[in-house]
Image (tube, rainbow, N blue to C red):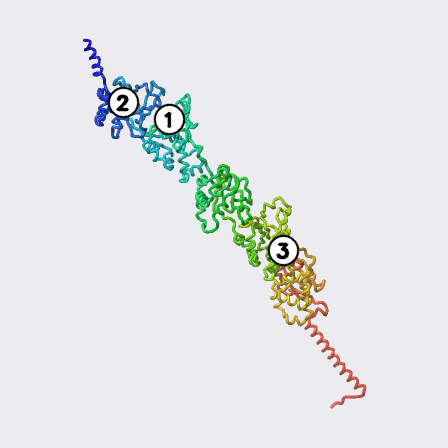
């Protein structure tokens, strides 16, 4: 009897043990589920389970599911461990029997299901959602270790991480990973944990930094940044214990994960706002902001790429100038032309290394430090400048008030470097400054190439060639030129024409070299001085003065001022001046000036009347009628009257010893005594702006001439070329011409002869009467 009782004690539990299948079969609402379990041949597998939890969809749940029912889908509803309804808590992670090979590792690799609750997040009462599907009927016990939880919908296995983030609305994380070429990695059959920011992916960065990171040249840095948000194993919130945990990110960075006593999680100090978003190959945790690795350092190179100056960067690399944009310790100023600007550049001309160095300034220039006309040093150090840095000219102009406020620059002024406009605001990177400019800057060319573009300097260029001085000036290292304008040469008048005469080549060279200083003299040198002296290439001394009242810079004499300063040259600098300085070694006499004037007839007549000895004297100014003027006279007849010829020539020689070196030779209503006599004077009158006539004072109407050209002699006096011959006022017998004199003499003789004849006949008649002679009639 005892043996029978013992036998029944073992047999009865066996017959009373129920499986999931047994329990489901007892309820019609699981008919559809049972049919699919049979179809997918899962009944034997489930019957072998000794414990577990089955999230069993009812028939209605299957009616709402429109996709195919697969074995994997059904396994995703089954756990290997039993869970009662009160065992679930918020963000709990459950492991299903659905295994995707390799996606979650080699062990514990069942696809995960996330639990959420309404009400209390802890274990106990409250609505429970499994993978987002509510448990509608709790705790149907199959046996002591097997529990059925009825769900109102079918559970959906999670997608891969890549597919999950691809479907995120209003997120650019997927596209950024795609640009970084990281999607293939996340698609690999292995587990990952993703720490994703709730903000825009590149929100921590400026617009320029974003542009760089999204550029193909910034791909490595973009990967560095994104990889520190990826861990190559699956980590759920429950894996992080209170305190500090270190995990290695995909880029090798050690992420420090801290959990406080309230289970608040931070990653590298950034709070986690959402945990455990399920994916097939891991989990996603949402951060309040992004993790920026300390290894991600921005340099000038990266900023230039972000500012669309990639051609500038590539040229710097090509010509060995990479250190300028890779060394963050140096505070340069970069003038970066856009890519479009380089498209218009002629690559065949010039030294490209020099061109690039001309776009780099050795110090950081802020807009507030830039003034109009400022010359800044560049990194282009020229041997032609005697080892000094080439300068770059800055122009600053205050912006028009008519420009809308939102379009105005922060500094309220527009800036140009070497004629290239600055586009937008400058950018600061580690203390360096980057300006984007409208065009590629070209280093200053040689003096001929540079000065020939200014038509107002054509006379100077012609002088260089005439004196054959251009090569010496081009070859002088670090030269400063004071370049006279065309007006300056025109003001020299006949002196300028003489200097261009073949006989005056050496004098012209001396004048040109007197305007050349063999050292660099920029306008900034004149800022705080009243007077400076420089030795010139001519061996002379050139004096520079600053006028106190008008703040002008004068060169050589008070009337010769700088009108355009700091014209940069390859080997120096030029300053445009409005006057020509004749240095003391250069002597220009009246004889020299007559060579320049078209007055050969006048010069020959001076020899005829023996007046050439007064030409070297500085006490006389010569009125020299042109050859055309003498062409209107009968010079042959005039040569027959030496007295009148002498009077005419002496009338054209003016006493002018009282003239100042800086006083104009010809002014309105100015009269001069002539060599003819103190009473024989000429008067200058201005008939139009800068146009004069000279007339004989007291002479007949029309006895005048127009002033054609003027030239001062350095020895004193000068020559005034006129277009008519002036005729002296007749004074006494000497005032009559030879013809008149002959006519008077002949008339007088004939008159005397006539008187004598008449007197003779009268006498004879009277004499006969006294002798008694009487005429007899016929």
Note whether residue 448 is visible.
yes
Does the CB distance between marks 2 and 1 fall below 8 Å? no
Count up the numbered dots.
Answer: 3
Q: Which mark identifies residue 186? A: none
The answer to which of 253 and 68 lies nearer the viewer is 253
Q: Quadrant of the N terminus?
A: top left
Determine whether the residue tagged by mark 1 lies in a helix, strand or loop.
Answer: strand
Which residue is pictured at 49% across the width and 44% down the height?
Answer: 359
Determine whether the residue tagged by mark 3 lies in a helix, strand or loop.
Answer: loop
Note whether residue 689 is visible.
no
Q: Which residue is mark 2?
A: 54
Q: Which residue is mark 1?
A: 275
Q: CA distance from mark 3 to mark 2?
A: 112 Å
Q: CA distance from mark 3 to mark 1?
A: 90 Å
Few, some or many residues within 10 Å of mark 3 (<14, 14–19, 20+) = many
Q: Quadrant of the C terminus?
A: bottom right
**Which quadrant of the view contains residue 194?**
top left
Which residue is pictured at 59% across the width and 45% down the height?
Answer: 524
Rendered location of residue 594, percent (x, y): 63, 63
| Left/right of residue 559 with respect to residue 153 in the rendered view | right
Few, some or many residues within 10 Å of mark 1 (<14, 14–19, 20+) = some
Rendered location of residue 701, percent (x, y): 65, 64
Q: CA distance from mark 2 to mark 1?
A: 25 Å
């Amino acid at each position: 009897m005892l043996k029978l009782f013992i036998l029944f004690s073992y047999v009865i539990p066996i017959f009373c043990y129920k499986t999931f299948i047994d329990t489901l079969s007892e309820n019609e609402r699981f008919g559809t589920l049972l049919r699919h379990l049979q179809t997918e041949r899962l009944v034997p597998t489930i019957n072998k389970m000794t414990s577990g939890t089955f999230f069993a969809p009812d028939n209605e749940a299957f009616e709402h599911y429109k996709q195919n029912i697969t074995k994997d889908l059904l396994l995703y509803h089954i756990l290997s461990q039993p869970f009662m309804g009160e065992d679930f808590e918020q963000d709990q992670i459950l492991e299903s029997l659905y295994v995707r090979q390799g996606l979650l590792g080699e062990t514990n690799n069942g696809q995960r299901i996330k639990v959420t609750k309404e009400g209390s997040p802890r274990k106990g009462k409250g609505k429970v959602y499994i993978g987002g599907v509510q448990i509608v009927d709790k705790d149907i016990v199959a046996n002591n270790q097997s529990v059925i939880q009825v769900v109102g919908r079918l559970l959906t296995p999670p997608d891969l991480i890549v597919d999950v983030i691809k479907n995120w609305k209003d997120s650019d994380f997927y596209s950024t990973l795609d640009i970084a070429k990281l999607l293939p990695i996340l698609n690999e059959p292995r587990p990952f944990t993703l720490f994703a920011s709730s903000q825009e992916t590149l929100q921590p960065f400026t617009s320029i930094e974003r542009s760089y990171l999204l550029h193909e040249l910034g791909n490595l840095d973009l990967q560095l940044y994104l990889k520190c948000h990826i861990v190559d194993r699956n980590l759920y919130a429950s894996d992080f214990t209170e305190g500090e945990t270190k995990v290695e990110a995909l880029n090798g960075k050690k992420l420090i994960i801290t959990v406080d006593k309230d289970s608040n999680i931070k990653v590298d100090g950034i709070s986690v706002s959402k945990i455990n978003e399920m994916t097939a190959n891991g989990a996603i945790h949402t951060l309040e902001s992004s993790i920026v690795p300390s290894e991600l350092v921005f340099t000038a190179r990266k900023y230039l790429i972000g500012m669309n100056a990639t051609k500038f960067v590539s040229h710097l690399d090509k010509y060995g100038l990479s250190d300028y944009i890779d060394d963050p310790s140096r505070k340069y100023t970069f003038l970066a032309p856009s890519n479009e600007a380089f498209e218009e550049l002629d690559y065949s001309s010039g030294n490209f290394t020099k061109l690039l160095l001309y776009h780099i300034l050795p110090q950081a220039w802020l807009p507030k430090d830039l003034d109009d006309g400022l010359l800044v040093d560049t990194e282009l150090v020229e041997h032609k400048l005697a080892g000094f840095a080439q300068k770059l000219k800055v122009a600053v102009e205050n912006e028009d008030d008519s420009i809308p406020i939102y379009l105005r620059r922060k500094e309220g002024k527009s800036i140009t470097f070497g004629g290239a406009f600055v586009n937008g605001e400058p950018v600061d990177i580690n203390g360096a400054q980057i300006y984007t400019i409208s065009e590629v800057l070209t280093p200053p060319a040689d003096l001929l190439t540079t000065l020939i573009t200014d038509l107002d300097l054509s006379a100077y260029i012609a002088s260089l060639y005439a004196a054959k001085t251009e090569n010496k000036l081009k070859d002088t290292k670090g030269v400063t030129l004071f370049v006279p304008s065309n007006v300056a040469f025109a003001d020299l008048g006949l002196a300028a024409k003489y200097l261009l005469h073949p006989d005056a080549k050496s004098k012209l060279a001396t004048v040109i070299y007197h305007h050349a200083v063999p050292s660099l003299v920029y306008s900034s040198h004149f800022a705080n001085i009243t007077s400076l002296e420089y030795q010139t290439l001519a061996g002379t001394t050139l004096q520079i003065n600053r006028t106190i009242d008008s703040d002008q810079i004068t060169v050589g004499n008070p009337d010769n001022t700088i009108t355009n300063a700091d014209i940069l040259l390859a080997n120096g600098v030029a300053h445009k001046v409005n006057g020509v300085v004749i240095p003391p070694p250069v002597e220009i006499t009246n004889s020299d000036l007559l060579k320049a004037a078209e007055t050969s007839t006048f010069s020959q007549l001076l020899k005829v009347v023996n007046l050439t000895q007064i030409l070297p004297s500085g006490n006389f100014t010569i009125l020299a009628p042109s050859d055309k003027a003498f062409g209107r006279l009968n010079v042959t007849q005039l040569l027959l009257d030496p007295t009148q010829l002498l009077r005419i020539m002496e009338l054209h020689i003016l006493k002018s010893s009282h003239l100042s070196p800086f006083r104009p030779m010809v002014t309105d209503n100015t009269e001069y005594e002539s060599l003819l006599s103190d009473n024989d004077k000429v008067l200058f009158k201005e008939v139009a702006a800068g146009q004069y006539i000279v007339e004989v004072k007291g002479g007949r109407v029309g006895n005048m001439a127009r002033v054609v050209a003027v030239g001062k002699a350095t020895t004193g006096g000068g020559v005034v070329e006129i277009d008519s011959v002036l005729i002296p006022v007749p004074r006494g017998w000497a005032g009559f011409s030879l013809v008149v004199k002959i006519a008077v003499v002949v008339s007088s003789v004939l008159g005397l002869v006539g008187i004598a004849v008449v007197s003779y006949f009268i006498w004879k008649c009277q004499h006969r009467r006294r002798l008694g002679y009487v005429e007899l009639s016929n």
